[in-house]
Amino acid sequence: MKLCSDCRHFRPFTHTQEDGSCTLPTLIWIHPVSGQKRFPLAFTQRMSHAADACGLSAQFWDYNPGSPPEPDEQEDVL
């Protein structure tokens, strides 16, 4: 399963382990008042059906080399 926490675009929040931000460059926007970069919630990106969102299929997921290896997606056959 492609977890956001194993993606190179994921930036965890410091105050909770439940969620984080998605730092995919095409999703970053600049706040018009403060000029600060804003990043969408990773959960929002994964649950969205919008064409430019990662979605349930994790279309923009990119493996983070610091994460544990991805397990086989096939089930064991006895």
Image (cartoon, grey):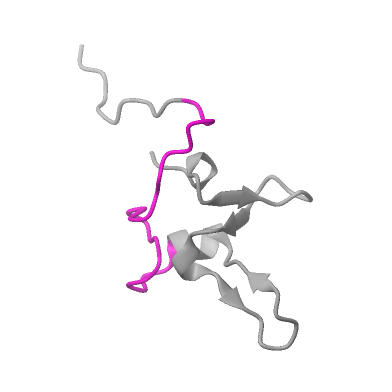
Give the image location of residue 6, x and y in percent: 50, 39
Which image quadrant: the C terminus? top left
Magenta stretch, main secondary structure class = loop
Give the image location of residue 51, x and y in percent: 32, 72
Outermost residue on the bottom side: it is 33
Residue for point 38% across, 38% down? 1
Asked if residue 68 is positioned above or below residue 38 in the image, the reply reads above
Residue for point 39% across, 49% down? 61
- The image quadrant that residue 41 belongs to is bottom right
Question: Looking at the image, which is closer to me, 72 or 32?
Answer: 32
Residue 31 within the segment the image draws in magenta: no
Give the image location of residue 72, x and y in percent: 31, 26
Give the image location of residue 68, x and y in percent: 49, 26
Number of numbered discs present?
A: 0
Question: Looking at the image, which is closer to me, 20 or 30?
Answer: 30
Residue for point 20% across, 16% down? 77
Q: Is residue 12 left or right of residue 50?
A: right
Q: Is residue 54 left or right of residue 24?
A: left
Outermost residue on the left side: it is 77
Residue 67 within the segment the image draws in magenta: yes
Q: Is residue 45 left or right of residue 38?
A: left
Residue span colored magenta: 47-68
Outermost residue on the front side: it is 35
Residue for point 52% across, 31% down? 67
Asked if residue 23 is positioned above or below residue 12 in the image, the reply reads below
Outermost residue on the top side: it is 78
